[in-house]
Image (spheres, rainbow, N blue to C red):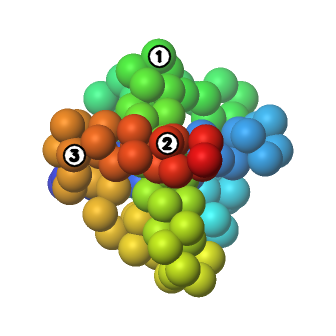
Amino acid sequence: MSSLETIQNYLEAIHILHLEKNYVRAIDIAEYLGFKRSTVSVALKKLLAEDYIKIEDNFIFLTTKGQKEAERTYERHETLAKMFMMLGVDKDTAYHDACLIEHDLSDSTFEAIKRHYKKSIEI
């Protein structure tokens, strides 16, 4: 796979779709991400080879490795988007911008943002 960001976007999509539907197929991922099915098929082969997913009866499941990365990315996305909305950013922009930066933040910077966000919602 060409980049960690691409891997994270696919894994997060699989995670979200699984939360919403309890099952994930390649066509679901293609529709969710707005990609062609052939593009998704190539990516899935790479995710499979790198042990992020397993495929059984055309259903896609995250491996332990894939689940860990998906949950990490999803937490970043949700936390950042909610923080931006607290600052007055509209929902669509907040989620879009969170997606842009969730991959590039260091763990220490994200943890500081998360601590600040949690303190802010406790007040």
Q: Residues within 10 Å of mark 2 (few under 14, many from 20)?
A: few
For the residues bearing labels 2 and 3, Cβ distance under 8 angstroms: no
Dot 2: element = helix
Q: CA distance from mark 2 to mark 1?
A: 31 Å
Real-space Cα distance between discs 3 and 1?
Answer: 25 Å
First along the sequence among labels 2 and 1: 1
Label drawn at residue 109: 3
Q: How many C-alpha atoms fall within 10 Å of the one at disc 3: few (<14), some, or many (≥20)? A: few
Provide the residue designation for mark 1.
Answer: 64
111 relative to 50, above or below: below
Among the 4 quarters of the image, the one containing residue 24:
top right
Are the residues tagged 3 and 1 within 8 Å (C-beta)? no
Residue 2 at what x, y percent from top left?
19, 54
Q: Alpha carbon of mark 2 to alpha carbon of mark 3: how far?
A: 16 Å
Q: What's the amino acid at mark 3?
A: Thr
Of helix, strand and loop, which one carries label 3? helix
- Residue 35: give its label: none
Q: Which residue is mark 2?
A: 119
Please give the name of the residue rendered at 20% of the width and 37% of the height, measured from the top-left corner: 108
Residue at figure coordinates x 22%, y 37% from the top left: 107
Q: At label 1, which amino acid type do we have? A: Thr
Which residue is rendered at x = 28% and y = 53% of the image?
103
Q: Earlier in the sequence, mark 2 or mark 3?
A: 3
Q: Which structural element holds mark 1?
A: helix
> Left of 109 or right of it: where is 69?
right
